[in-house]
Amino acid sequence: MRFVMFCHSLVSDWNHGNAHFLRGICSELLARGHELAVYEPRDAWSRVNLEAEHGHAPIEAFARVYPELHSTACDPATLDLDVALEGADVVLVHEWNDHALVRRIGLHRHGGGRYRLFFHDTHHRSVTDEKSMAAYDLSHYDGVLAFGNVIRDLYRRKGWARRAWTWHEAADTRHFHPLTNEAEEGDLVWIGNWGDGEREAELDEFLLGPVRDLGLKARVHGVRYPDRALERLRAAGIRYAGWLPNYRAPTVFSCHRVTVHVPRRPYVEALPGIPTIRVFEALACGIPLVCAPWHDAEDLFTPGRDFLVANDGAAMRQRLRDVLHDRDLARALREQGLDTVLARHTCAHRVDELLAIHAELEAQPIHLRSIAA
């Protein structure tokens, strides 16, 4: 089949975690022999900021690491959809696209497009910026692929889309897998952005405080850290190492002994069951993981076996101490977390799910198909 994807950026993951999963899905589709075309705006803020800070070298590095992946930079307002969508069977439109483009693609489908058309939502804006999300015109889309049940149900309840399915993120195990690295560089590593005020208190409680009090050798990667955040890292004795190309995360994990997951507040309070892709990737790399509280409402994992959970800062200190001093515990967490990802949460699993959704739609009676068209 021919797949066409419209996304914010495939080539840049600067403050753009959605690129991780999209890359894995694209690689998996190509590996199975499908055709693929990807379109992204030439002025995407992620790529613009990446090149402003680091030049063109990261784009060249992406091409070396993902030689199979290519995208077309375009002006969404003038893109010729007849050309872009010619011969398409499945079209994925990610939620970081302009409202106007989302609507134009829907109208193109309504005007005679023979493809299946999906809106892909992988963010908390459905609850934190409801007005913006409600403004997307999805009337001519087959439905929404939402990365959690609560978002799927929101689209259904609000009437924003005709149909909605849960399509969780997952690990790209072509790149995220355990590496043998005997050159240990530290105790703890955390990869994540500061969070626009969405988890400052949580980072203090579950990362900075425990690292400081336990005297751990720790390193943090991420972008958009204000001066006050950098000062707090320094006060906790944490090395700030800046932006990390996502494909290098397995190497960084391999030379540290533990990592933590500190979810943003909207995921804890309003979107239970959505761990974000960092959990999948860490477990795929075989590094022991300790999580700040989040409710695995969808039974994706087995807390206590795949990873440990710390309900407060004191518990985080104890869990980190346990992992760092108990080799059997650390090994069990590495092995169990990896086994769960490989059994249920790879990009190959998600492509299987996408193809099953497509088959479900294609199996509908002709009179029902015409409703969606």
Image (cartoon, helix red, strand yellow):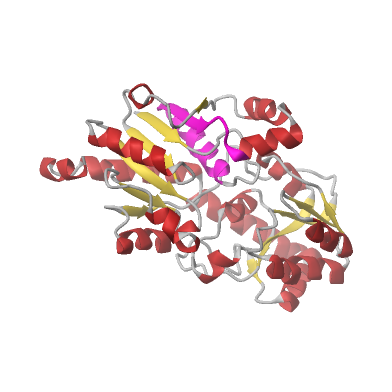
Q: Is residue 38 magenta?
A: yes
On screen, residue 47 versus residue 153, left or right, reads: right
Q: Please say if 317 is above or below 333.
A: below
Q: Residue at x 11, y 43 (%)?
A: 367
Magenta region includes residue 34: yes
**Residue range corresponding to the magenta coloring:** 18-45
Asked whether, in this view, residue 72 is left or right of residue 202, the answer is left
Considering depth in this image, is 335 or 251 the residue closer to the camera? 251
Image x and y of residue 289, in percent:
67, 60
Instruction: Answer whether residue 168 is visible to the viewer in this image.
Output: yes
Q: Residue placed at 69% from the left, 77% from the top?
A: 312
- Measured as percent of width and height from the top left, residue 271 is found at 49, 65
Which picture quadrant has residue 99?
Answer: top left
Between residues 80 and 2, which one lies in front from this camera angle?
80
Residue at (83%, 60%) from the top-left corner?
Answer: 233
Residue 218 placement (x, y as % from top left): 83, 57
Say which quadrant the C terminus sits in.
top left
